Every structure is written in C-alpha cells, then in structure tokens.
Amino acid sequence: MSIKAVQLEKIIDEIADTLEGCFLNKIFQTAKYEWVFEFRKGNRKFHFLISLSPRYSRAHLITGAPDETSDPGNFSRLVKKILLKKQLSGISQLDNDRIVSMAFRYHSGEYRLVAELMGTSGNIYLLDEHDKVTAIALSRKTRSQTGTTYSPPEPIKGLKPEKQEITKTTLDGQFAFNKEMESHNKAPAFEEKLTEAKNQALGPLKAELKKSGKRGKALESEKIVLVKYKNDRRLADLLKVNFGEIKKGISSIELEDIYAQPPLVITINLDPSLSPEKNIQRYYKKYRKYEKGIVRIEKELEGVKSRKAVIDNIITAIENAEKPDQLKDYIPQTAARKSVAKRGERRPSGPKRFTSSDGYTILVGRSDRENDEITFRIANGRDLWLHARDYPGSHVIVRLPKRAELPKTTLLEAAMLALKYSKAAKAGKGEVTYCFAKNIRKPKGGAPGKVLVNQEKSIMVKIDPSVIREMKDSREVN
C-alpha cells in the first residue's frame, strides 16, 4: 500500500535536520518507478529512496546503497547533470500531503525536486529557481507540463484525518520509523520489481510468438493453395500428348489418364480465352510455382516451429526466475544498451534524440525518410520545426507540451543542431528557418524530405560544439 501523509510527515521529521546541508553525491535508478538519492555529509552517506510504484509509492531512508540498478532514463541523466554535487538546503512535506520537496542551492537561487507519492498519478518534477517545470520523471497524465509553473494537486475534499497509530514503530534508535517503513515494504517491493522485470522480459517474446503464429497460419494457407497445383505437371503432359484434340474456345476436355493404373478418363478444365499452347503453359507454370514454393514454405514453417520451441523454453526460464537480476539478459533493451556501451559497433536506429538545457526533447532526422517520419508522424502541430535555410539537411523537431512557452535557449540549441546536421555545417554559422510543425505540409508527389513551409521565421546561429556535447544524443548515453 502507498505511503500515508502522516507517515511521510514522521519520515521527514526524522531526517530533515540530518540531511540539511548534505551534498547530492549519486543518483541510482533502481527500477522503472524507483530512484535512490545518495547524500554525503563528511564521511557519512545517506540513501533516500523515492518510489512512484502504482501500489507502493513511498519515500524513506534505506540501509546502504542499492545492490541492483537499471539503465537511467532521460530524467535521471538530466537531474544528474543539474543537481549532482549540489547542496541540499532543505527537505520538507508540502501541504501536509503525500508530497516531498527537496531544495538544492543552485548558483544564486534554488532548484527543487518535488515528488508526488500518489500511486498511479504520482510523479517527480524538477523545478528551476522560478518554480517552472524543467523535467518530469514519468510520462503520466499530469497537471504541470514542462515549461509551465508547477502547481501542487488540490487536497481531496471530505477526506477523513488519518490515524496517528499508523506511525507507531517497534524499532528504536535514529531514523527508527524510516527503518520500519523500509522493513515493511521490502518484501512487496521486491515482488513488484520481480514482476516488472518479468513483464519487461516476456513482453517482446510474447509479441514475437504472436507475430510468428500469424506468419505460421499464413504459410499454412499458402501451402494449401500450392498443394492444389501438385498434379498440374501431369495434366500439362496429358494435354501435350493430346494436343490435336484441344479446340480453341472450349472450357474443358475429357482425356484418358495414361499415367493412372488402371487408366481412367478425367476432365481437365481449360481457359476458353487462351490458345491450346497457352493452356498447357498455364498448367506447367502452376506446377513450377508449387515446386519452388513448397520447399520454401516447408523450410520457413520448420524455422517458425523451431523458434517457437526456443521461445517457449526462454519463457519458462523467465517465469521460474526468483530474482530480478536473473532476468537482465532476457530484457532486450538492457542487453542492447550494454552491447553498444561495450563495443560501440552499432549506432542506435531512429532519429537522434537530444535534451536541451531547459529539459526539452529535440529530435533530429538522419535521412530523408526519417525527416518525413519525425515531421509528419511523430511531431504534434504545436511542436517546433527547424531546418538550415537554403541548404540540404536534417529536419529538427522540438517537442513542446500544451501551452508551453519555448525558452530562447532551447530555440538557439535546436537551431545549432539544425545547422550542424546540414551542408552548411562547415561554415560554422548560418541562418536557420523555424515554424510550428502544423505549418509544414508535403507537396503533392514530393520526394521524401521535401516540404512546403508557411509562416516561417529565421534566426542566425553559430555552432558551439561544447553546447551540443552537453545536450548529447540521449540514446547513446549510459
């Protein structure tokens, strides 16, 4: 069960004075919905867990660094980039609700991490010194979009006060209630992580089984059609032997089947619109189709059955796993990232993906077809579209939430990317055209990558390699 407001109040009361003044030393993403923040004060380290689990949302200290971590997402990378080594100026509970606020000293102001521990609607927000949302941890439905001022959820009317008894603990010493909460949630949280890991591993396999099942049915149907042509060579031979008896325009002919034992009379259907020669060729052609196709189909069916057996064995191993770390090799996304990190042999597919210093996602097409993909299929009408003026190059899309104002810094950074991934890059500076994606349309019969632009503006920009390195391609960051 998710944490109660009175429980969170007691947790914060126990740790607030100790954590104040600590420096954020490390950030671990331990699961899809779970983060651990390591704070340091002198030689002491404290590990503060925040979980946005739908069933077990909570926040409390844990004993020691986590044993297992997962691949950090964009949110974790951005928080590390901005807050790592920054000093915690305070941790508090907002509005006596299930909301934790951690304030960090950042230059002349403060950045805040606000965690709403509210089950399926919970989220973590990174706020700048003006309380504008810089980044959001999970893509859940939320009131506060990136670029807007954060607003906490309204209290639920008519909610009965929670009983203080749920904050009692059987433990003694410092952080007793935090330890109680850790102990209480350890088993159910473990089971949830195990289930999540199994679902991640099983999802692609079940999708593959479904796809191969459809392919197997299609092959069986194709085989049924081809088998009908199995005897067509014999029919063609009979027509050839009795060529003189075939009259043009007839729809069938009765002939003695000399290949049967004993011989018998059979009826062979003909196409009255074809000549005798063409009718014979038609039967030979259908037989050749059978002869070539049946071998291919049988081989492919055998491959489908063999692969199904392999997948069934893998699924059994996954379902029998007892720990999440036993499933790491079965989760394709994790395996793929490790492979790229170790060898660097393959670049990831799909558009390049960057994160601006304001936390906005920027997509860069790598080919004409990919330019069409991000402009006409991925982008919303409110997203910003950019392109180097008068030069061939990539389409660039800045993803904008509803009613969000585009920061000038993000515009400049996106323009740099449009210039860098164009034929104008060698000059190091140039003009970039931009407009909303809704003002881009495809010319009739236009080649991939070709577009017509309306209501465009332009901006002069100079490429700064250090700025682009800071944004990074988020598909390649570990």
Image (cartoon, rainbow, N blue to C red):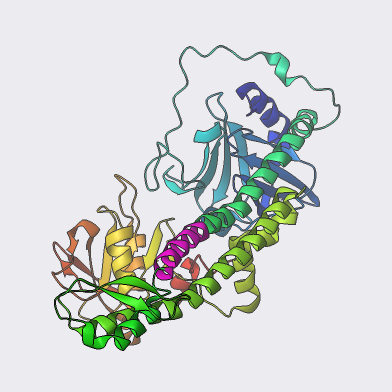
Quadrant position of residue 248: bottom left
Task: Identify the image quadrant of the C terminus.
Answer: bottom right
Q: Is residue 83 found left or right of 275 in the rendered image?
A: right
Magenta region, residue range? 211-227
Quadrant position of residue 208: bottom right
Instruction: Find residue 274 and report its horizontal and vertical position in percent.
Output: 17, 79
Check residue 222 for magenta coloring.
yes
Chief secondary structure of the magenta portion: helix
Check residue 57 for magenta coloring.
no
The residue positioned farthest toward the right in the image shown:
172
Task: Identify the image quadrant of the N terminus.
Answer: top right
**Res. 18 visible in picture:** yes
Residue at left offset 66%, top offset 49%: 198
Q: Nearer the viewer, residue 257 or 411?
A: 257
Q: Is residue 352 found left or right of 29 in the rendered image?
A: left
Q: Is residue 122 found left or right of 239 in the rendered image?
A: right
The residue positioned farthest toward the front in the image shown:
262
Q: Nearer the viewer, residue 34 or 412?
A: 34
Q: Is residue 80 above or below residue 444?
A: above
Q: Nearer the viewer, residue 67 or 111?
A: 67
Instruction: Find residue 433 and report its horizontal and vertical position in percent.
Output: 22, 70
Q: Which of 234 and 39 is in front in this view?
A: 234
Residue at left offset 63%, top offset 40%: 51
Q: Is residue 475 above or below residue 234?
A: above
**Res. 428 visible in picture:** no
